[in-house]
Image (cartoon, coloured by chain):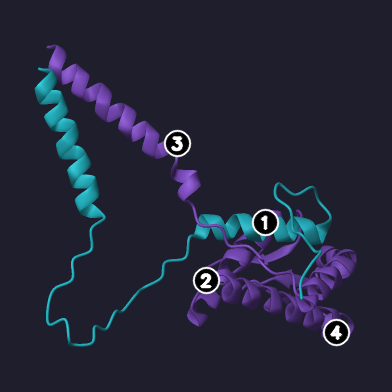
Chain colours: A purple, B cyan
Amino acid sequence: MKTPQSIFKIVFVMLMAVVCHLNAWAVSYDIKEMTPEVKAALDARRGRYDQLAAFKSQGLVGENNRGYAEALNSPEVVGDAVDAENSDRKLIYKTIVEQNGLPADALPTVEKVFAQVQRDKAAPGDSIQNESGSWVKK
Amino acid sequence: MRSKERFFVLVLLSCMAAGCTVKAVGDPNRPITINAHITVDVKGLEKTASNIEDYVSGAPAEGTVKTQGGK
């Protein structure tokens, strides 16, 4: 029968329109205002990146499941870099929460998302902590 | 047949519109307490996080992290 087919086509077209526009409806959480503090934190992280990557490849530093670097061995060697890195990261996470109008209790969610991204981007052999808390080598 | 199709489409559109309607009932003079639960769009946040980490690592980023500007 023609009618059910026409209705099906209409419904299908409407559904496709909804699906195609889903990305447009996705919320974007950006650093909307690049304050001097945030810029300094990002630049410091860039400057520290190679050092941190080296520590990770040596197994001295890992990425925990809360979005922060963690000293796994030789804390006297890597401690300062880890502390500085985590301080910068926390500033960036808090900035995202504040500038996007999220409640303060959204910070753990932001941290966990960054933790997942860190796990995804970790180099082979780096130590990462999965969501269950277990430390594994990527 | 065409009128049935139109009716069906109208019903669908009405349902969509009704789903977006907020109704307020009660005493208009009484303060209304709204408990809003804000859901974080994880996908959107993942994209931002990925862009930031790409910027930090110096890798080509899909998006951009603009470091100019600010107060």
For the residues beneath circles 2 and 1, the answer to whether they share a chain is: no
Chain hosting mark 3? A
Question: Would you name the residue on which mark 1 appears?
Answer: B50
The three-letter code of the residue at mark 3 reads Cys
Marks 2,1: beta carbons within 8 A: no
Q: Nearer the viewer, residue A25 or A1?
A: A25
Q: Residue at x 12, y 12 (%)?
A: A1
Q: What amino acid is labelled 2 in the image?
A: Thr
Using residue A34 as the reference point, say whether residue A27 is left or right of it: left
Percent coordinates x, y for residue A28 in the rendering? 56, 57
Mark 3 or 4: in front is 3
Q: Are the two marked residues, 3 and 1, in contact with CB atoms closer than 8 angstroms?
A: no
Q: Are marks 3 and 1 on the same chain?
A: no
Measured in 3D between alpha carbons, the distance from the residue under mark 4 to the one under mark 2, in whole angstroms, is: 26 Å
Secondary element under disc 4, as helix, strand or loop, is helix
Which residue position is annotated with label 3? Answer: A20
Q: Label 2 to label 3, Cα distance in Å? A: 27 Å
Q: Are marks 4 and 1 on the same chain?
A: no
Does residue A116 appear left or right of residue B61 in this picture? left
Instruction: Report x, y in % for residue A22.
Output: 44, 44
Q: What residue would you read off at disc 2?
A: A109
Does A137 sit above or below residue A36? above
Q: Residue at x 12, y 82 (%)?
A: B27
What residue is pinned by disc 4? A80
Q: Position of residue B36 (x, y in %)?
A: 34, 75
Placement of A26 over or under A12, stated as above or below:
below
Observer-side mark, 4 or 1, equals 1
Query: What kind of element bears circle 2?
Result: helix
